[in-house]
Image: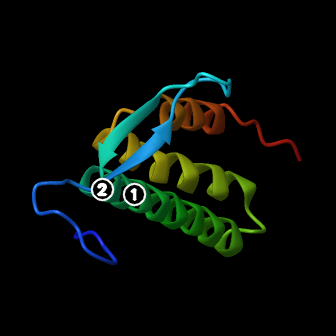
Amino acid sequence: MSSLVVGFVAKEKVEKAALKTGIEEEDVDYTEFETEVLYARIDELEKKKNLYKRKLQQVKNIVERNYENPEEIRNQLVKLLSKLVKKKKSVSDIEIKNAISNIVIID
């Protein structure tokens, strides 16, 4: 992505954005990051957000389709999360999968 600059800018000067680091204090240092790095990080976080949105939508669909059958909901959720865990070993996904597989259905 490119940066948006208004006005005259020296060709040698690289536009950078300052980010505050640490706890808010009077003498907090600023770490400079290139604008391109920030945009790349924003894109990465957008992709992650969209992944979680899709995951949530899949869970909603499973619950809606199997509303009357809690065992099927559990089985489908375990199946969905097992696929996600195989792709990426995320601690939270593994914990969720284990928690769901330990759900006991009581009639």
Q: Quick check: 40 left or right of 61? A: left
**Location of residue 45 in the rendering, given as x and y in whole percent from the top left corner:** 42, 54
Which residue is tagged 1?
Answer: 42
Question: Which of the pair 23/52 is nearer the observer?
Answer: 23
Q: Residue at x 57, y 69 (%)?
A: 57
Q: Residue at x 18, y 54 (%)?
A: 13
User: Could you tell me how far apart the alpha carbons at marks 2 and 1 are, in whole angstroms?
Assistant: 11 Å
Residue 59 against residue 25 in the figure, above or below? below
Give the farthest residue toward the right: 107
Choose top left, top right, bottom left or bottom right for residue 68.
Answer: bottom right
Residue 27 against residue 72 in the figure, above or below? above
> Which amino acid type is shown beneath numbered disc 2?
Thr
Query: Mark 2, mark 1: which one is toward the viewer?
Result: 2
Which residue is tagged 2?
Answer: 35
Choose top left, top right, bottom left or bottom right for residue 90.
Answer: top left
**Location of residue 104 in the rendering, given as x and y in whole percent from the top left corner:** 76, 36
**Location of residue 3 in the rendering, given as x and y in whole percent from the top left corner:** 27, 69
**Location of residue 21 in the rendering, given as x and y in whole percent from the top left corner:** 52, 29
> Which amino acid type is shown beneath numbered disc 1?
Ile
Q: Residue at x 73, y 62 (%)?
A: 69
Q: Secondary structure at mark 1?
A: helix
